[in-house]
Each structure stands twice: as C-alpha cells, then as structure tokens.
Image: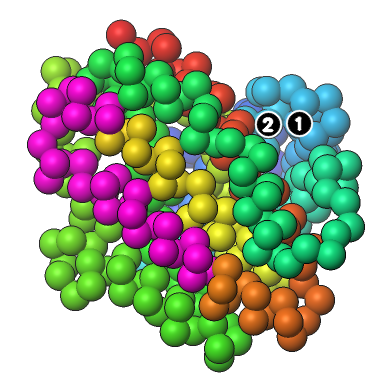
Amino acid sequence: MDNSLEMNDLPNEVKNLDSIELLKLPTQKSLSILKKFNNLNDFFNINTNFKNEYLKLIKNRIEDAFVKKYNNANYEIHSILYQLYNLQISDPLSEEAINQHQPFFYEIRNLIEEHWLNSLHLDYVLMVKDSDKSISELIMELCEREKISEHTLFSFLATEANERQLFAFFKSDYELNIRFFDVLIFTLLNSPNITRMEMIKNLWDESGRGNYKETHVNMFEDLVNNFNVTNKNNIVPHDSWQKLAGYNLFMLASLNRKNYYTLLGIMAATEAIDPQSYIKVQEACKRNNMTEWLYRYYSEHSELDIEHAKGWLNYVIEPIAKESDIKNDILFGTFSRLKTCKDYYDSLYQYLQSIK
Ligand SMILES: [Fe+2]
Ligand SMILES: [Fe+2]
C-alpha cells in the first residue's frame, strides 16, 4: 500500500507529509491540514487505515478530556470541534469550504459531541431537581445561583485592570460577540411562528436598528480597532480550552436541530447574565479614561439585554413550553451556558494576570 499523499492539490506546508506523519501530529493539527485537502476522499482511498487510526487517537483524547479531565486533551478536543463548527460557516472561497459535508468530519463531530454532552449532563442531573415552578423562574433561579457577575474577573476589571489587560479582555471576548448575530439567525430557522417577532426584534437591535454604523458587530470592531494601547499587537492572545468550549457550546446548539431548545436556554441565560457583568466592564473603561463612544457596546448591552432576557423568557420560551414538553432541554442549555461561561471567566482571569 502506498502511504504517501498525492502531491497535487495539497497545501504547500504539507507536501512533505505522509499519512504516517499526519498521525504523529496532535489531532487538532492534523485536522487543520486535512480540512484543506481538495482531494480528501482520494487520500482516504489511498491510505485505507488512516481513518481508523485517526479515530483511535481521537477516542483516546476524548477519554483524557472528559473522563480524566486533562487540560491538554480538552484543548485538543475543543480545538477540533471549533474547527469543525467553523467549517459550517466557512468563507465560501476558502480551501476548506469544499469539505463542509465530508462524512468523516461528521463522524468525528458526532463522537465528540456525544461525549461532551454526556459529561455536561452528568453535572446537570446532579444539580436540577423536578419542580412545579415555571420555566422562566427556573432559568432565573439558575442564573442567580451562579452569580456570574460577581466573578473575580469583573471586580478585577472594575478596580485593577490596566489598559493592556482591558484590551486583552476585549480581544478574548471578540469572537463570540461577533458571532452572536449568526447564532441569532440559527434560532430563527424554522422557529415557531409565535416566537418570530421577538427574535426579529433582537436581530434588528443587533443590526443597529437600521444604522449600519451602530450594528453590534461594528460597535465591537470600533472598540478593538480604536482603543489606543501601547504595543497592543504584542499581547499574546487568550488561547485556552475553556475559551474554545464557551464558543463551541453556542455552535453545538446552533448546528444541531435536536439541540434547538438547548440553544434557547443558552440564549436566555446569556441575555440574563450579561447586563450586571457589563456594568463592571464599563467601570473599567471609565477608570482607564476611555471615551463613551469607544465602550458603547457594553453600555448598550447592559441596558438592552435586560429587555432581551425578558423577551426570550416571556415571548419565546414560555409560549413554546406551553405547547411542548421541552423544559428540560431549555434548562440544560441554561445550565451548560452558565457552566462553560464560568469556566471561561476562570481561565480568562488567570490569563489576564499574565498580561503586564
Ligand atoms: Fe448584541
Ligand atoms: Fe441582547
């Protein structure tokens, strides 16, 4: 059996790699190479053992991540998921776009998602008891119990963080804040009719209510592009598995129809917890002499998201929960968002301590 790759159509950096060498790389690195092959099926046909060997490696890493809780395995696994999710929204002109529906990639994704969801469910089952309370009450109870806005990260930002640390915080938050518009679109797809008005209202707010300069994406771009910080390009980016997991949770629930109600629970939790935390971010901005225009993303959300949270609860989640028995999926979404968000803030706080 010829184990070498066909040299045509391969990215330059991998022309000297064969399938054996690909298997020696960390699994997330080999995936970043594989997803750019434009003759991936040929590669699998030539290297008949590759898929099995690669899956074996991934299964080991899954166990290391979700059973043994090793940080480096969690990083590897979440980095794979992150790449596979972004493949679904890739730049149409990118090399990876042609592999969007590669069955082997779906096999990997399903495997990881199954184990990740199982491990989240284990914690969730231990935590939530049956209750007669309304779904809104249960969601708010969960959010209040977790007290995310009282996380050390936010008191540190409000009272101590210097401008480099503040900038590093914005950069770390960047990707999910920019992706939020797309996540909202996923909530809209084939949504129950009664909920659409509220979702469209959210999307309209997200789009600057018709003023393209004030879309939330532009607000955040303005913040990172115009905040003048000495040597801001030298700041090492935040790159932890907790950061990837925070992003991945939104994508998992957006890209899988069976997790649609989980997505609604994630959205409600996000809108409910952000305003209180964002007030502390605003304090940090004022203390670092930033102009109000620069940090308007946070001032806008600390007010608007109070309305959005009520909207998700009263006009989306409650009406749906009256029609179908989906309370548990929604609450699981809220729980998972709070958990991954807290993990992310723990890791972000640690990371900010390393920025001087
Ligand atoms: Fe927004
Ligand atoms: Fe919002």
Instruction: Name which quarter of the figure residue 167 lies in.
Output: top left
Instruction: Name which quarter of the figure residue 157 lies in.
Output: top left
Location of residue 325 in the rendering, given as x and y in whole percent from the top left corner:
81, 76
Label 2 residue SS? helix
Label 1 amino acid? Ala
Q: Main secondary structure of the magenta part?
A: helix
Q: Residue at x 12, y 45 (%)?
A: 293
Q: Earlier in the sequence, mark 2 or mark 1?
A: 1
How many neighbours does mark 2 have within 10 angstroms: few (below 14), some (14-19), or many (20 or more)? many
Whether residue 134 is visible to the viewer of this picture, yes or no, is yes
Q: Is residue 276 left or right of residue 204?
A: right
Q: Is residue 117 above or below residue 170?
A: below
What residue is shown with label 1? 65
| Of residues 247 and 307, the one drawn nearer to the viewer in this rendering | 307
| Of residues 166 and 322, the one drawn nearer to the viewer in this rendering | 322
Instruction: Give the magenta range.
Output: 283-312
| Of residues 211 and 89, the one drawn nearer to the viewer in this rendering | 211
Quadrant assignment for the C terminus:
top left
Label 1 residue SS? helix
Location of residue 172 in the rendering, given as x and y in whole percent from the top left corner:
39, 34
Q: Residue at x 43, y 38 (%)?
A: 277
Q: Is residue 86 left or right of residue 113?
A: left
Q: Residue at x 51, y 53 (%)?
A: 272
Location of residue 170 in the rendering, given as x and y in whole percent from the top left corner:
32, 35
Q: Are marks 2 and 1 in contact (CB under 8 Å)?
A: yes
- Residue 74: mark in rendering: 2
Query: Does the stretch in magenta take in 289?
Result: yes
Whether residue 78 is visible to the viewer of this picture, yes or no, is no
- Residue 128: mark in rendering: none
Location of residue 347 in the rendering, given as x and y in whole percent from the top left corner:
54, 24
